[in-house]
Amino acid sequence: MDFQIMGNAESLSTCEEDIIPENLPASAGKYKLKCQQYKTEMKEGYKWYSQRNAEKTKSNITHEQSPRNKIDDMYVQREEEITDDLTTLDRKALLQQGYADNPYNTLQNTRKSDSEIVAAEKKKQTVAEQVMIDQLSRAVISDPEQNVTTEKQGSAPILPESNIAPLRVRKRTLHETKIRTQSTLTENMLSHKVQFDSRIISRNGRDACRELIGFFFTHDQSLTIYEYRQFGKNRTNVLPFIQKNIYSHQRGRRKGKQYQLGDFYIGANLTFLSSDHPRLSENIKENTLLILRITNIDQIALDSLRTDSVEHEDDINSQEANDRLAFKAIQDKLKEQLHKRGVRILTGLAKYFQQLDKEGNGLLDKADFEHALKLFHLEVSEKDFESSWLILNDNGNGKVDYGEFKRAIFGEMNEYRKSFVRKAFMKLDFNKTGSVPIIDIRKCYCAKKHPQVISGHTTEEEIKSSFLETLKGDCSKSDGVSYGEFEDYYEGLSIEIVEDEDFVNILRTPWGI
């Protein structure tokens, strides 16, 4: 049996003729059966392909898609075939875990840690000194009480050298101790403080990587936050980011309640109204709330101040504990579903939410979140979803920030891990633009110490290409990676890593931080 006989038996369409070539030499007898099977499989495959295309065309004609449906089509084709099986991208992303099996050089790690600790302490000391100078210098000079003498004397002329002259015009030194008003701050009063590091919760790299150092003063329950900036090796700048004042929570169970000592711990969020702080950048003021996360704190000072402080326990503590338990139950269930797929799911969700956010304010409604979970095959019971939504939508406007939604139901890596993610990105983003070109990432990424490269099972280029492919797979721009996308990648990778030091090795080794 040859192809000429088959051609006489049945006419083929143009496409089928392309699939099954003609004018081939006659096949040997023992291969005739295989040729027949090949012909049947190809024709059946073409028939199925044609039917599916016809159905899709018909569906597109009869059903006008909404903007969200159009976005969905980009993900359905990729996700509909994926339930429990790992994709090629999942396997390539998991290659990064190999660095955890090759511990970072202990001696080098110790040296870097020591130098980093010294630099951090020097930075904190610089900021603390600037805070003391600012508060002690400005308090006396700007205090309205210094006008009292003038007001009592009326419009009578006062000589500058007179003993009855108002404090404001007397000849004196800046820190003269005799010049004091009732509200004057003293160094002793300001010494009763707890110092903490914080960061801005933002997907914008320029804001997320800013170095903020705050102070909470127990004598009047006020707080201030300063920004530390370094230009080159020797030039630094320390400026107020949040002016010293008494502030209150702006969201959550404690909304409207004044900040107290118990509100300060690693991982706590501080919320402020952006409109109350005109010096903030335009990027930050686009959001109604400014949210700061405490990343480190002076634990010795905090413990000392707690012994002298008496704070009343209330029902809010138990309510917040119940909220955490509700989210923890969801996170535990989703962690099983994200097993070995965390990078692909979290980066894909972030891009999907960003595409839905047409207004650019980071807010989406309840239906958007429910649909996203179904689209990415993430099962959350209706009861769990409703309870989490009630907690997140505390302002009742029907919209929630999608970054906050992700952090709540998926959880997030601890601040120790996140500090290394920020450190790696800051090394790449030396121009502080908030986005890193792919070409710069390729130059900086080093795969020499990957175990598979050391053993000879693969090459540096293959490991590097695998990393870049999985990193930029869900990036909004093909030629660059934003901080939010960089963080999402390592957030997904972090899910599978139990030990902090193993995760840190995954960042230290290829980036040399």
Image (tube, grey):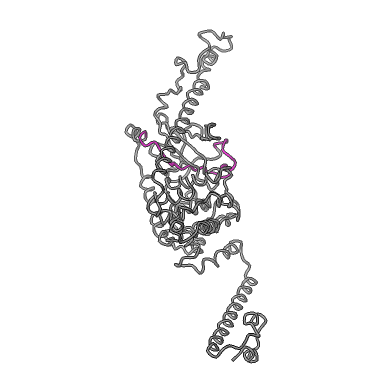
**Magenta highlight range:** 276-301
Give the vertical position of 321 relative to 93 (above or below). above
Indicate the quadrant where residue 97 lies. Answer: bottom left
Give the vertical position of 512 relative to 468 (above or below). above
Judge whether residue 285 is colored magenta. yes
Residue 206: x and y in percent read 56, 43
Counting labels gives 0
Q: Toward the viewer: 231 or 139? A: 231
* Left or right relative to 218: residue 231: right
Residue 382 in sight here: no
Report the quarter where the N terminus lies.
bottom right
Judge whether residue 11 is colored magenta. no
Q: Toward the viewer: 156 or 233? A: 233
Farthest front residue? 456
Give the vertical position of 203 relative to 142 (above or below). below
* Left or right relative to 92: residue 106: left
Q: Toward the viewer: 104 or 483? A: 104
Give the vertical position of 239 relative to 187 (above or below). below
Residue 237: x and y in percent read 54, 32
Residue 420: x and y in percent read 46, 46
Residue 277 in sight here: yes
Q: Toward the viewer: 412 or 120? A: 120
Indicate the quadrant where residue 110 lies. Answer: top left
Farthest left residue? 307
Residue 259: x and y in percent read 43, 37
